[in-house]
Image (spheres, rainbow, N blue to C red):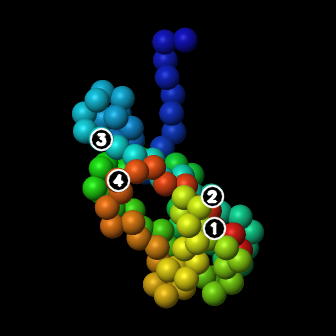
Amino acid sequence: NWRRTKEFKDEASAIAWVESKCSVGEHFHVDVSVQGTGAGKSADKSGTYYIAKDGSFTLNVEGYANLKAAYDNGTDISTTISDGEGTYTIAKVTEDHTIAIVF
């Protein structure tokens, strides 16, 4: 099949993906997985996002006081989210990230 279809979470992810396939700039992916969501417990992003090198990525977590666990590439970030009042930011993305949020 010569056609390729891919869905993106946002416009920036689509642009970054196309540029990465055309070898225009360096891009990384941020995979966000959220488990145990419910009333007052959610994150504003889920799925894969493509970010240009040195770009930023921010995740907002509603109900962060109820977090059971939160990890970025295996590093516990639950305190960072709580201290940031529900916000986790990667100021400069320089590698792929896998983020897991568990309520």
* Mark 1 and mark 4 residues within 8 Å of each other at the beta carbon: no
Indicate the quadrant containing the N terminus: top left, top right, bottom left or bottom right: top right
Q: Which residue carries the number 1 mark? A: 101
Q: Which residue carries the number 2 mark? A: 33
Q: CA distance from mark 2 to mark 3?
A: 23 Å
Q: Which residue carries the number 3 mark? A: 26
Q: Earlier in the sequence, mark 4 or mark 2?
A: 2
Q: Earlier in the sequence, mark 1 or mark 4?
A: 4
* Mark 3 and mark 1 residues within 8 Å of each other at the beta carbon: no
Q: Which residue carries the number 4 mark? A: 94
Q: CA distance from mark 3 to mark 4?
A: 9 Å
Q: CA distance from mark 1 to mark 4?
A: 21 Å
Other-residue count near label 3 (Cα within 10 Å), few / some / many at <14 / 14–19 / ≥20? some
At x 50%, y 80%, the residue is 80
Q: CA distance from mark 2 to mark 1?
A: 6 Å
- Looking at the image, residue 24 sits to the left or right of residue 100; the answer is left
Q: Is residue 99 above or below residue 20?
A: below
